[in-house]
Image: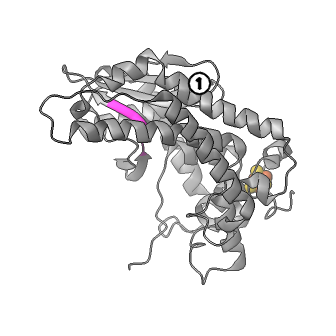
Amino acid sequence: MAKLENNFTWSPSRHGTFERCKRQYWWNYYGSWGGWEYTSSGETRAAYILKNLHNRWTWAGTVVHDTIEQILRSIQGHATSGALLFEAPDIDVEREVAGVTKRMRANWRESRSGDYHKNPKRHFGLAEHEYEDEVPKEEWARINERAVRGVRDFLESDLFEQIRTSDPTRWLPIEELDQFTFEGTPIWAVLDFAHETPDGKVVIYDWKTGEMKKDQYSMQLGVYALYMEASRGKTSDEVETHLVFLGNEMQVLSLPVTEEDLKATRGVMRASIAAMKNRLKDVEGNRAEREDFPMTEDLSRCEVCAYRRLCGRE
Ligand code: SF4
């Protein structure tokens, strides 16, 4: 098998990590690179294991995302199973919700066993177990309730009913990682859910399980619109973008992306790519040295960071 190359790419989440802490960015994209190989150094392997850990908040979000993704895929599969006319399958909400709790219990037990040390990609792990953080039982129960509520609210919503009964042949690939090129840099884009209307509009939905921070997400929606422009030749007025907040009170926020927003998004991407490359020792070879990526001075960020042991900030 050909050796994987660490090529420079960009994504909104990479940008978010770079903004949060330069050292965290380095661990994520350089210091942990190759940690999947048995021959990797102790520190690279340790960084790779930590990189793959969830924390209790990201875990709830992942469970909600994965559950919705599986349900949508099953509806899509139903449409291509041979029937001439699409009949939307019924979804058993109670069964799906029970599945969320069952999965979370299994995840939690797997994490506590520490098996992720053997294979962090295959076995689920939580930073709370790695660092032996004291988390009260009630807090774990709240995390589970959050995920259950997110899935239940979604499945009982008018939005889901519209999606469930819509024509799946008009849906775009669900949660598939794809790339487009922006001024020579490959950009990663992965849509939670999108479909094309009969008049050629693309409607994009993004599930959110964290706090409602409208400003933070507008750049991400701008990137989706640029992806639609690059992959399907859609202009900004042919793209509709919606944020769907799940886990607390379900809310759907429709944020149109204008040409002005696209210009601003391009500006952020350009500046972010330049700042990341500026810190590289060798831009061509995408080589980075740890000392050029300082640790954040905001210690509250370290408290929830998986790399705190490697940074000496446990
Ligand atoms: S522990 Fe702190 S300094 Fe180290 S990577 Fe995490 S956030 Fe950055």
Q: Is residue 191 magenta?
A: yes
On the image, the x and y values in percent for residue 210 come to 64, 31
Q: Is residue 22 left or right of residue 134?
A: left
The quadrant in which residue 194 appears is: top left
Q: Is residue 256 visible?
A: no
Q: Residues within 10 Å of mark 1 (few under 14, many from 20)?
A: few
Tell me if residue 218 is in the magenta stretch.
no
Q: Which residues are magenta?
A: 189-194
Cβ of mark 1 under 8 Å from ligand 1: the answer is no
Whole-percent x and y of residue 305? 75, 51
90 sits left or right of 26 in the view:
left
Name the residue beneath numbered marker 1: 215
Amino acid found under the numbered disc labelled 1: Asp
Q: Is residue 111 above or below residue 119?
A: above
Q: Is residue 8 left or right of residue 133?
A: left
42 or 115: nearer the viewer? 115
Q: Residue at x 71, y 78 (%)?
A: 42
